[in-house]
Image: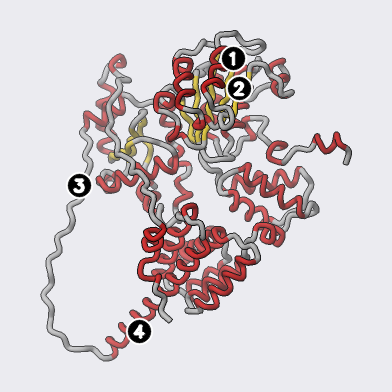
Amino acid sequence: MSYNEYMAYQVLYRTYRPSKFSEVVGQDYIVKTLVNAIRNNKIAHAYLFAGPRGTGKTSVAKLFAKAINCENFNEEACDECPDCKAYLEGNHPDIIELDAASNNGVDDVRQIIEQVPYAPLLGKYKVYIIDEVHMLTAQAFNALLKTIEEPPAHVIFIFATTDPQKVIPTVLSRCQRYNFSKINLYEIKKRTMKILEEEKIPYEEKAVEEIARMAEGGMRDALSLLEQCLAYNPEKLTLEDVEHIFGLTSVPEETELYLEIHENKISEVITKLRGMYGQGMDTKRLAVDLLEIVKDALIYSDQGKESLLTRLTAGEAQQLINAVSLETMLEDAKNLEEVISREKQNSSFLAYLELCLIKMAKNTRKATTVKKTVKEEKEEPKKEEPVPEETVEEPVSFVVEPETNFLLAILLDANKDLKIADQIIYNKLDLYAYEPEKRKFYQLLIGTELFASNKDAIIVCGSTSQAASINTKAMNEELYRFINKEFGIDKMIFAIDQEKKKELIELYKKVPPDERNRPVYVEKYKLDEVKEETPEEKLYGLFGDTLKVEE
């Protein structure tokens, strides 16, 4: 390979970066909203693109910058006009990118501010794309604040961040915010297979699926993983190579390990685990895989449909169901999910995983002992004096009952664009259908509809019983935290039934148009601060009495 050929090579994620809105993966509602804004000439002066890494924030920012300057925009930029050609050549003078991770001081921001008053050299707009904007210092944010609030008509700011909580509220309030969600496994798999076909590289579908799973919702991560595999074997992508490169275990190995745990072969399990770790196994990935196979077995026991399984075959799922009780599997799922969630806090994850497996084995022994005791008592019933039943008072559950006038105020302040943006909750709801700790939110919202949204609240409509459940104070607070963490939506949720919906619509019609769109104050729950635990607290909080393993 010559020097010029070497220098011309680009990694896959750069080669296959979206060049059109139609190529953006997994962010349909955002693309649609931005295209409509350009088409209707309703372009804001500041945008915030927030979401996990590798989900398309910077790519969409660049496409948006190109599209708003295109002279012949029609759903997509034309790629023919002078503006588009300058963008494609990488030298458009009016699209300025700044990496706030390395240029985060007040002097860097002042350079932007000094250039803002000058008119664009080529296009209609001068667009500043600031990546990882949360890295700016407090002084830099304050220096930028006035410019964001009252920029010239020809200037647009697009901020991208993986951590919107670190952006100061005064900047957040001046931006249109778009929350980029993790891309689902199917979309990543589909895009990866298309790239392999374009590169004319044979592949095993299971290998692509494994890469999509490891990417954890990031398209860029998937392509980086793919590139690593192709560097090892450029002729073909195989599951065996993927498992070897990334220290993964196969499904048969994981199934065997899980069954041995519940056969009380804990000594063999720990020995095997340490041997796999010595060969470069990814311990977190093993924990996630064990959770996946437990989830598959639970799904199959409930639905009996092989099409819903992601890791196991129907035969493998049935094997687990025959060997382990559903109650034990549910407890296992809870233990695995808990240890996975603490992975980033633990310097020695292997030790925690070992203790988790010991706990799972100990739960099996307890379940077996209880079953045996019940059987013996059934065979030799003992005569006991009847014990008078105690009256147990049901705990009173406080229900949030928003008054009709308050709901009407939210409805009058509602916005169609906000409703479209908040629809992401329903678009991604199915992803939580079989997650043990989050399934309750799926069950709570499935079957309801998003009725209205303003900047601080969402009104959903469902059955009377659903509305009552959602408005229960404890569940309402949990739901608020869930949508805040998973979707970056900082809004309260209030629920109504069909009768209340009809009533609100009738009241809305009676309000004169000039009295609508009045701001309404909505008091939100306070998010708890995460307290750092000591190593001892982490250990005992996770495993309790399982630290004393019976000989």
Q: Quadrant of the C terminus?
A: bottom left
Q: Are marks 1 and 2 in contact (CB under 8 Å)?
A: yes
What amino acid is labelled 3 in the image? Phe
Q: Which residue is mark 1?
A: 125
Query: Up-down: is 194 above or below 134?
Result: below
**Residue neighbourhood size for the residue with mark 3, other residues' Cα within 10 Å, grouped as few (<14), some (14–19), many (≥20):** few
Disc 3 is placed on an element classified as loop
Which numbered tag is attached to residue 372? Answer: 4
**Residue neighbourhood size for the residue with mark 4, other residues' Cα within 10 Å, grouped as few (<14), some (14–19), many (≥20):** few
Decide if residue 535 is in sight here: yes
Query: Up-down: is 336 above or below 70?
Result: below
What amino acid is labelled 2 in the image? Ala
**Residue neighbourhood size for the residue with mark 1, other residues' Cα within 10 Å, grouped as few (<14), some (14–19), many (≥20):** many
Q: Are marks 3 and 1 in contact (CB under 8 Å)?
A: no
Which one is in front, 153 or 467?
153
Horizontally, residue 232 falls left or right of residue 3, namely: left
Which numbered tag is attached to residue 65? Answer: 2
What residue is drawn where x is 35% and y is 35%? 491
Horizontally, residue 79 falls left or right of residue 388, namely: right
Q: Earlier in the sequence, mark 1 or mark 4?
A: 1
Q: CA distance from mark 3 to mark 4?
A: 42 Å
What amino acid is labelled 1 in the image? Tyr
Give coordinates of residue 299: x percent, y percent: 47, 62
